[in-house]
Structure formats: C-alpha cells, structure tokens
Amino acid sequence: MGLFDEYKEGYVRNWEKLEIRSNRASVVKKEAKRILDGKPIYTQIESRTGVPWWFVGLCHYRESSLNFGTYLGNGQPLGQRTTIVPKGRGPFTGPNAFVDGALDALRLEGFVGASDWGIARTLFRLEGFNGYGYHGKGVNSPYLYGGSTLYGPPEARGGKYVRDHVFDPNFVDTQLGTAVILKALLSLDPTISIDSNDGSTSLEPDDEMAKDVVWLQHSLNALGANPQLVEDGKSGPLTRTALSRFQQLNGLNDTGLADPLTIAAIDRQLQPSPDGAASDIREKLESLQAAIRALTDRSDKVPSPANVNTAGVNSDLADIVSALGGAVQRVANTVPPVNQGGSQQDRLRRAIDLVSAILLPGQAKDAPLGPVNGALGQTIGNLLDGKKSAIGIGGAIITQLLSKLATSSGVSGDLTAVGTALSNITPATGLSPFAMPLFLGLAAWGFLGKLEKWNQGTSTTPLN
C-alpha cells in the first residue's frame, strides 16, 4: 500500500486534533447543509459504485462548488468533452448527466468497489484528488484542512500551490477543506458512518491500481518526463500531464489516461533496438567522414605547426576517413555495444578492439615492413603506410582545437561540424580519454617509420 501506509497515522492524528475556526463555523455549516441537500443524487451514485454518498458530495464541493452541471473529475461543463486532466471525458448529457459523469470519474480514480472508508483512507483519497505535494512542504493540505486550526496562521503554517510546480509559502487558501466540512456533516446527519476495514487482508481497488501507476511513472521518467515524477503510485495531476505530453508527442489520442494504445507505445519505446548501438556508431562515423571531407576541401582550415611540412595532410586525412567509412559499412552490424563501465584499461582495450575491427579489412601488402612499421602488426602497418604522420599531426592539431570550439565565437562552420562529429563519436566508442595520446603516438610511429625508410634508402626525405 506504500504511500497510504506512510501517511495513515498522520491522517488519524490530524482528525483527532481538527478544530473548525470560530470565524468560519457558520459558513462551514452552510456548505455541509448544501451537501446534505444533494444526498438524493449522491445516493444514486453510491448504489452503483459503493462509494459513500457523503464522499461524493465532498469531492463535488471541492471540484466545482456543488454545481450539478459539471464533471466530478475536474469541474468542467458536462455538455463538452473535458480539456484538462482527465481529458477527453464526455460529453455527458440527459437527465442523468451528473450521475453518469460521476461514475466515470470515480472509476478512473479506482474507488469503485472499495470497502475501507475509515477516516485515514477517506482523507487519503480526498487529498489524492489534489495531489500529495503538501507533505513535502511540511504544510497540511488546504484541500483537507482549510478553515481549521491545522492550516494557516497563527496556529499552523500556510502556503498553497498557486499553479503547477509553484508553491507560495505566504499564500493562505480561503476555500474550506473537505475534512472540515465532513466534521460538520457528522453533526448534521447521524446516519453517516466512518468505518475502517483495517482487518481485511485484501488490497483496495486503488491499491491495485497504484501498482500499475508506479510502472507508468517509472516508465515516463525513463523516457524523459520533465519534471521527473514521484513514483508514488498516485495518478495525480502531474502524472496525467506527463502522460498527456507523451501522447501529444507520439500522435496518440490526448486523454492523460493510460489507455491500451498508450501503454503499448510506452512499452515499445522502452525496448532497446537490437542493432541500435551499431547503427549509432555507423551514423556518427559517417558524420565525421562528411565533416572532415568538407574541411579538407579548404586547405586554409587546417593550421600547420611551426617548422613542420604538412603537405598532403588534408588529402591523407580525407582518404583514411573515407576508408574508415567504407569499413564501418561492412562491420557495423557485428560491432557489439560498448560498455562504458570498468577500469580505464578495460575501456582502452574495448576501444582498441573496436578500432581494430574497423581497420582490418584484409588488405595486407606483400612487401615486408621494417621493425618500426611491424611493431603493431603487418596488416595495420600496411593499411596506414604513408598516412600515419599526416593523420597523427592533423588529428592532434584538430583534437586540441576542438576543445576550444564550444566556447569560441566566430568559428567556421566546417570546424564546428568536425567538432560536433568528434564529440559525438568518441563517447560512443570509448575513445574520449585516449584521443590525443593515440594521435600523438600515431605521429611518432609515422616519423620513426619514415626515418627507417630514409635510412634504408626507400624514402627521399623524412617528412614526405
């Protein structure tokens, strides 16, 4: 029962201490008599739902000031479809419009067939119509206690939610609370019985419903509900508003209620895509390839370090990215999702495994490599032969520059595109902490290899 068990003792304690303010006593009695006048209609609802007539009357007072032309669930006119939560109810017409609308509202709340109507459960259900947010503010809800010494100065704290998510601690609600009116009703009609069913081991209908609502709240939170919902099992205004927003975004009938189509849509979105990780990597690498191609079309966009001949850097960089893009097309469907957990060594190993899968298309050359180029394997050495220096220098420079892009103004669109692509791809592959060391290592490998070739007479200058 969760939330009810947490609040139960507080309701009992407050009921025992509740005193109607002397300056509000006459108006409290007046409203109680109005509810008593509507008893013949309310008893029709009780006979069909098991919900006590006086409980229906109290909800009716707070939601629409006892206007029989309004929907019990939110106080909107019966002759139109409701536009606030619960949305899309009605229209209700004819001589039994109010009763029909009340049956609908009570069913949505899970009250039909309930057997426990003791004071704790009654106050819990009444407060649920307006939400339980006041508990978090250390304030007794005016929805229950307005007009009593339990709410508002000088005896107690005041405060009110003046609109969604906005609590004003200095605002005192002047509307009478439902617990206050119930106190007056008991003195006017001795037939009213507030019986608790604590001995029962079966769950109440609204407790059963709460289990489904907890799943709903948890699911909406997982899908990005803003603000995040309290997973309390109560389908209050915030939960229904979040559900309504989900329905709007997904082209569903906007009701704010968890109908079967909405539940199915939520369930589908919670299911992970079987090839989502591989597809995401492929798309990000393709984005990186396109961005660097745009960059290499304009040689002035890659700065050159002092005293370094970077001729061919752009074309080599574009060539290798193009090769990577083609390789990814072949292997993306076999690349497993990268787990970001584990030690730094584990993450580096996974990153290298992924890079190795991309860089091993089986295109080895017949010519043997020297000791330096052979250090990391003949296949990879041949694949990158002639490109290691260019990629290492260009990658190190770009990596350094990209760290400044987010806060710099006047940055070219091409560099910004590369920055976006790299910032997206490195977290996906686990390479973020290692991008600069790998680029520098690749540059050093390339320089050593060129010196080796130069020494062997197979290269005319070390930097070509």
Image: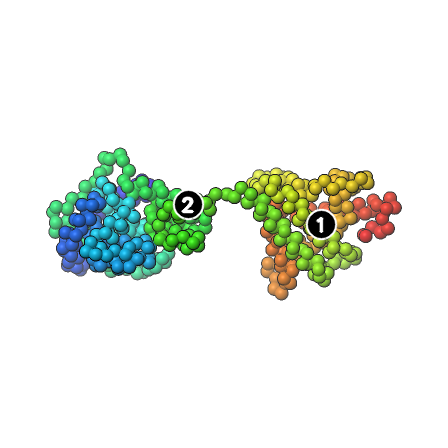
The amino acid type of the residue labelled 1 equals Ile
* CA distance for labels 1 and 2: 45 Å
Of the residues under marks 1 and 2, which one precedes in the sequence? 2
Q: Which mark is residue 89?
A: none
The amino acid type of the residue labelled 2 equals Ala
Q: Give the image location of residue 38, x and y in percent.
A: 16, 54
**Residue in view at x 69 percent, y 46 percent:** 438
Callout 1: few (<14), some (14-19), or many (20+) C-alpha neighbours within 10 Å?
A: some
Q: Secondary structure at mark 1?
A: helix
Farthest front residue? 94
Q: Which mark is residue 320?
A: 1
Please identify the quarter of the rendering in which residue 455 is found: top right
Which of 114/20 is in front? 114
Q: Give the image location of residue 416, x and y in percent.
A: 62, 59
Q: Is residue 191 in view?
A: yes
Q: Quadrant of the N terminus?
A: top left
Q: How many marks?
A: 2
Residue under circle 2?
264
Residue 197's place in the image compared with 155, above or below, is above
Please give left or right for residue 198 compared with residue 441 in the image. left
**Residue in view at x 67 percent, y 41 percent:** 356
Q: Secondary structure at mark 2?
A: helix
Please give left or right for residue 144 compared with residue 392 in the image. left
Q: Give the image location of residue 304, x and y in percent.
A: 74, 58
Is there a contact, CB below 8 Å, between mark 1 and mark 2?
no
Farthest right residue? 457
Closer to us: mark 1 or mark 2?
2
Which of 391/25 is in front? 391
Residue 199's place in the image compared with 248, above or below, is above
Q: Give the image location of residue 463, x and y in percent.
A: 81, 52
